[in-house]
């Protein structure tokens, strides 16, 4: 599936995305803000729901929930003299861009590169490179949506099953100093990680998944996966769905090189 070309009504495009298995939901007319109560959590492929949404407001923008079963999207920013295209060229020279399914020109003159969606990647941002990544827990506006009167336009599209590896892209564009594994001082016992659960519990919507992933990675790196249930409880209390919490914890432990997290099943 590639984004539809120009000339279509938003509802027609939404049906096409849903037909391909990409969950969609409406954003406000000319806006990036969700028009549903729970944002991308409301995304669906149900054609009847799509008809209900767009029959009320036919000009609403179309948003796609990213991450499998939806696509992963590399967002190349361009605002004034700040551009992510040099970073994109660097990624291409390193052989990391593969063959995207589609390239969409955004209203600011940037680009969205669509790839096959993955299950275990998350949203990311490299400020200095002006490049973002949208996967599980994110969404993008899609053609024929408009912002400030300027549309999202398909520049090219082609069949492709290629995925995009955000971790490799970050390593190239934003390398971090080697972290040493934490070791307790002699006689100091285990590291106190209670602050991680408090951090997750205090995050507002839009930053909860990223905070949970970061906190779980820190715990796993310290060899303290025993605090995962506490992190899960904080994330659920903050409003994250249980399935998303479990996937995020499992992904964090894989990233940190540990044993995948398995939640304790309720008795009975």
Image (cartoon, rainbow, N blue to C red):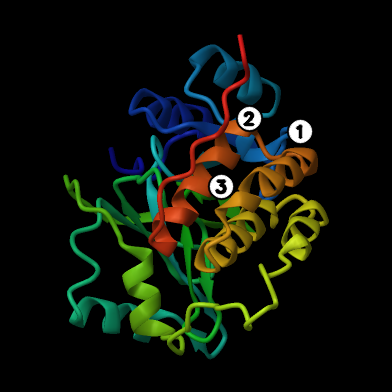
- The residue drawn where x is 43% and y is 44% is 67
Is disc 3 in contact with disc 1, using a CB cutoff of under 8 Å?
Answer: no
Using the image, tell me which numbered label, if any, was put on residue 126.
Answer: none
Residue 194, given in percent of the width and then of the height, sits at 77, 61
Instruction: Identify which residue, 41 or 60, lies in the foreground.
Output: 41
Mark before the other along the chain sequence, 2 or 3: 2
Mark before the other along the chain sequence, 2 or 1: 1
Location of the N terminus by quadrant is: top left
- CA–CA distance in space, label 2 to label 1: 8 Å
Q: Is residue 28 left or right of residue 214?
A: right
Where is mark 2, residue-wise?
42
Where is mark 1, residue-wise?
37
Using the image, tell me which numbered label, if any, was put on residue 137.
Answer: 3
- The residue drawn where x is 60% and y is 41% is 245
Q: Would you call the spot at circle 1 few (<14 residues within 10 Å), some (14-19), or many (20 or more)?
A: few
Secondary structure at numbered mark 1:
loop
Image-quadrant location for residue 197: bottom right
- The residue drawn where x is 50% and y is 74% is 77
199, above or below 230, in the image: below
Q: Is residue 182 left or right of residue 135?
A: right
């Amino acid at each position: 599936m590639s984004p539809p070309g120009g000339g279509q009504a938003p509802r027609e495009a939404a049906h096409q995305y849903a037909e391909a298995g990409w969950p969609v939901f409406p954003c406000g007319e000319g806006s990036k803000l969700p028009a549903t109560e729970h944002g991308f959590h409301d995304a669906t492929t149900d054609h009847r729901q799509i008809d209900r949404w767009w029959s009320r407001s036919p000009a609403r923008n179309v948003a796609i929930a990213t991450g499998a079963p939806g696509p992963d999207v590399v967002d190349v920013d361009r605002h004034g003299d700040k551009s992510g295209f040099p970073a994109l060229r660097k990624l291409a020279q390193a052989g990391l861009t593969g063959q995207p399914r589609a390239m969409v020109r955004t209203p600011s003159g940037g680009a969205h590169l669509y790839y096959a969606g993955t299950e275990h990647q998350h949203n990311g941002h490299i400020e200095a490179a002006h490049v973002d990544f949208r996967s599980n827990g994110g969404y993008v506006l899609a053609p024929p949506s408009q912002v400030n009167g300027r549309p999202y336009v398909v520049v090219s599209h082609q069949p492709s099953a290629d995925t995009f590896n955000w971790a490799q892209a970050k390593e190239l564009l934003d390398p971090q100093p080697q972290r040493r594994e934490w070791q307790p001082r002699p006689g100091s016992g285990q590291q106190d990680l209670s602050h991680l659960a408090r951090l997750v519990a205090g995050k507002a919507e839009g930053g909860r998944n990223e905070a949970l992933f970061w906190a779980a990675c820190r715990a796993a790196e310290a060899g303290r996966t025993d605090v995962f249930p506490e992190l899960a409880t904080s994330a659920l209390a903050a409003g994250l769905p249980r399935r998303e919490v479990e996937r995020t914890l499992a992904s964090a432990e894989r990233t940190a090189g540990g044993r995948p997290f398995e939640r304790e099943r309720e008795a009975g």
